[in-house]
Image (cartoon, coloured by chain):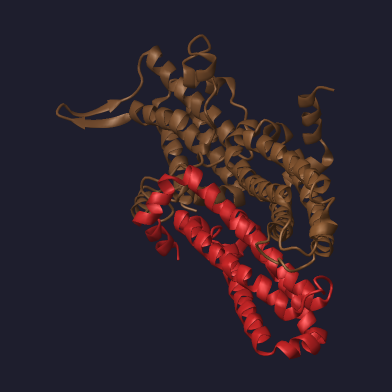
Chain colours: A red, B brown
Amino acid sequence: MNDFAVWLSTTRPSVFLQMHEVWMIPVIQSLHIIGIGVAVGSVLMLSLRVLGWAGMDQTVRETQLRFGPWLTGALCLLLATGGLLVLAEPVRELVTFSFWLKMACVAMLTALAVAFQVSVGRHEQRWEQTLVRHRAVRLVAVLVFIVLGGIILLGRLIAYDHIWGHLSPATRS
Amino acid sequence: MEISAWLKSLEGTGLAAGIRDSLTIFPILESVHVMALSVVFGTILIVDLRVLGIASARRPFARMSSELLRITWAAFAVAALTGASMFITNARVYASNTSFRVKMVLLVVAGLNMVLFHLTAGRSVARWDRAASAPGFGKVTATLSLALWIAVIFAGRVIGFTTTGAQARQAAPPSENFDDFLTGGADSGSPAARQPSSLSVRAIMAAMVDPSGDFLFESIADVADERGVTHKAPTTSQEWGAVRHHLQVLVDAQRLLIAPGLRAADPGDRSSNPEVENEPEQVQRLLDSEHPDFVRRAERLREAATLGLKAVDTHDRTALFAAITAIDKACESCHLHYWYPNDERAHQAAREEGGIIE
């Protein structure tokens, strides 16, 4: 991975980003945080609705129709800006434990978001009547939020990978 | 109390010192800050889009906003607390940072904008609660609100890119010797020139260790040229004096190098030979995670240079040669570990020359 990261850092798009990194990186990171805001807001509304703690004037389906597309859009923005950040600083990102753990969590949450949206579309009635009372579904609604917090934490920890001690490839060399 | 004295006293509190001394608390505070601000921004975005009639246009505004704004305020409290905790660790640096000041002004303006909304469209909410969007002035404040919060996020992120140099300067105030070395003595150079732009391992190497090391390696050697092999070594008192000066520079450089928090390089510095060299951020990670090891290696440089100073006192060329060889090995051993660990040829050469490899 180190070799790949070093190679990536010598490619033209990466060099371009590095040349302009003084303003590009804060701008891309800010867009990334805005994406996080949209994603967190959407997931919060969906989870609270499933749990019955907010937005009860809307059905689960209505809530999903309102926030689902925003969540998908936010994920796209996050992938695009995240990809640019990796391209701008391949070694800083790819040679860390935090980054890969974060990617695993992102993959998990994305799969869950897709499954949820498809399921609400297909089984509208079951969601309104039974699924929202299902203990496992309610547990997932809470866990999703914890994983999302974990993703944010891991994203920030990329800059502080030494916290992981020997799990971090950066401390082995 | 004067503001800067107050800021300094904030930095001196036990809480600030505790956060500074820990390797984990600051990143965790930052992460919780990002979590909280994403909730603040996410919920405000939902409310503003409702006011603008762009999303949730059919939901009654009053119920929705009262539900959401409770969450917004709770998250804002967490963001403010974590923000304040980070601020006190380096209060004077943040307070003088332009991005930080801009962010604080933007937060105040966003607050005033919110008050303005409540005094205008907020008062007539009963009339447009179920309408697709708020009346004109409400839309203006909602647009302003979105623009302001996005600007707050930008300004906040820029703080992290503009304080690093200042922090390094604070962590390791330049010694008089370093000032003199850069400016050629106290009586030359403008005050501005005397202040190095920023202090980093790379800057100290370039300004002090490299030139003095090169001078020392050249000062004593077996030279093979057209006149055959000659032994080069200091002879006059002037030459011995020059050697002493450069050895002293190395001793002083070691004191600067081991300062806690010293950055590997300036932000934006890149390796000119990334195939074998570590990039500054890799060096930084090693420095952060193995600082005691780095201190030990730097100590080796100081010991070798001190041996050299003793040799100069007795004009002992053999001892001086041994000391300069030890300086060379100290430099190389540290470079092999932090700077170019992937350089196989350098490792091979060090093994052949009996260098210190660890």
Q: Is residue A27 visible?
A: yes
Point out the residue furthest to the left here. B226
Q: State the image coordinates of residue B113 (x, y, percent, origin top left).
A: 75, 43
Q: If the image is split into quadrants, where does the N terminus of chain A sit?
A: bottom left
Q: State the image coordinates of residue B76 (x, y, percent, origin top left).
A: 79, 52
Left or right for B330, reference A120: left
Q: Nearer the viewer, residue B19 or B142?
A: B142
Q: Say if B124 sits above or below A43 in the image.
A: above
Q: State the image coordinates of residue B138 (x, y, percent, origin top left).
A: 73, 50
Q: Say if B170 sits above or below A114 in the image.
A: above
Q: State the image coordinates of residue A173 (x, y, percent, origin top left).
A: 50, 59
In percent of the image, x 68 and y 52: which residue is there?
Answer: B27
Q: Nearer the viewer, residue B141 or A52?
A: B141
Q: Nearer the viewer, residue B331 or A172?
A: A172
In percent of the image, x 78 and y 43: which residue is there?
Answer: B116
Left or right for B192, reference B341: right
Q: Quadrant of residue A164?
A: bottom right
Left or right for B239, reference B1: left
Q: Nearer the viewer, residue B336 or B70?
A: B70
In percent of the image, x 53 and y 12: which residue is there?
Answer: B186
Q: Quadrant of residue A58?
A: bottom right
Q: How many numbered discs? A: 0
